[in-house]
């Protein structure tokens, strides 16, 4: 079984774009893909509504393959209503925070408290860039601060923090933080380093599809010298446990 915890609906949500992901899943044996729709860095309430409707449409049309990640901007005044509706009415299984808000600030704390109440994970984009860091783009240090304030919150730090040597050390001591391996750049030592620091039980398979192809990410796992039980944890067991989707 293979679960992709971090993917995206192609811009425009075209039938062709959705079919590209479906065909890739069929070709490479992907059983379930958690998708969100993203656009600008600082979406207002109307943009959030449009984007989440795109996600919901894709999930309703492909319920066995797609699970929904609810995109929120914590700074928007209606975020609590967006979360309630997205989870209780639309069945979204994750909350997604991209770049709009630092997660160690008061607006994000409100999102965290709701995620705890609903017992669902928050997937947080985190990057550490030498150049081009976007305003309000979270790093692993922001994620660690949130994890420390709310140790009962289930967090998925995307992209291994963007730089494993910066990111993993920041969240290593926070057992409530998982990482996904989605990333545009793949370095041979990234995953072995994560295994060494975190163990296999806190690592999730993710691609960032449609931007990163499945052969690249599967190859990263298969080429890391892992045992069969370690690969099972990364490929699906950790996600099943985190999302409470039956026995892992």
Image (cartoon, helix red, strand yellow):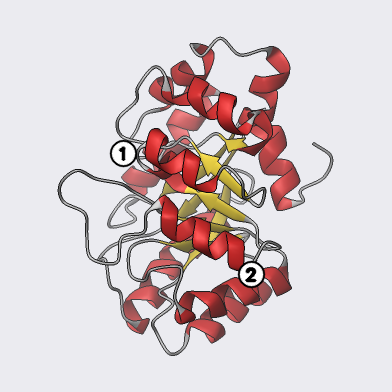
What secondary structure is found at the residue carrying circle 1?
loop
Q: Residue furthest right?
A: 247
Percent x, y of residue 245: 76, 48
Which quadrant holds residue 95? bottom right
Please name the residue shown 82% across and 45% down the image: 246
Q: Is residue 175 above or below residue 226?
A: below
Which quadrant holds residue 98? bottom left
Please name the residue shown 54% across and 76% down the image: 109
Q: Residue furthest bottom?
A: 77
Please tell me which residue lies in front, 240 or 18. Answer: 240
Percent x, y of residue 9: 39, 51
| Residue 90 falls left or right of residue 219 | right
Contact, mark 2 vs mark 1 (Cβ under 8 Å): no
Q: Earlier in the sequence, mark 2 or mark 1?
A: 2
Q: Is residue 28 visible?
A: yes
Please name the residue shown 64% across and 29% down the image: 199
Q: Residues within 10 Å of mark 1 (few under 14, many from 20)?
A: few
| Residue 116 falls left or right of residue 60 | right
Q: Which mark is residue 211?
A: 1
Q: Which mark is residue 100?
A: none
Please tell me which residue lies in front, 173 or 52. Answer: 173
Please name the residue shown 63% across and 76% down the image: 113
Q: Which mark is residue 115?
A: 2
């Amino acid at each position: 079984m293979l679960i992709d915890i971090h993917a995206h609906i192609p811009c425009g949500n075209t039938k062709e774009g959705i079919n590209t992901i479906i065909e890739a899943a069929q070709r490479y044996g992907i059983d379930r893909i958690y998708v969100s729709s993203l656009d600008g860095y600082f979406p207002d309430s109307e943009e959030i509504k449009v984007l989440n409707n795109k996600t919901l449409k894709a999930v309703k049309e492909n319920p066995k393959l797609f699970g929904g990640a609810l995109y929120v901007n914590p700074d928007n005044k209606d975020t609590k209503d967006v979360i309630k509706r997205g989870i209780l009415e639309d069945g979204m299984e994750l909350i997604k925070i991209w770049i709009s808000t630092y997660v160690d600030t008061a607006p994000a704390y409100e999102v965290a408290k709701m995620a705890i109440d609903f017992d669902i994970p928050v997937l947080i984009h985190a990057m550490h860039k030498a150049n081009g860091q976007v305003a309000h783009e979270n790093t692993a240090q922001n994620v660690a601060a949130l994890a420390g304030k709310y140790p009962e919150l289930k967090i998925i730090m995307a992209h291994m923090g963007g730089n494993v040597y910066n990111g993993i050390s920041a969240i290593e001591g926070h057992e409530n933080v998982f990482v996904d391996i989605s990333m545009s750049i793949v370095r041979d030592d990234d995953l072995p380093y994560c295994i060494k620091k975190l163990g296999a039980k806190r690592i999730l398979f993710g691609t960032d599809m449609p931007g990163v192809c499945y052969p690249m990410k599967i190859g990263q796992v298969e080429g890391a010298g892992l045992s069969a039980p370690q690969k099972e944890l990364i490929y699906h067991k950790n996600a099943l446990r985190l999302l409470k989707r039956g026995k892992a």
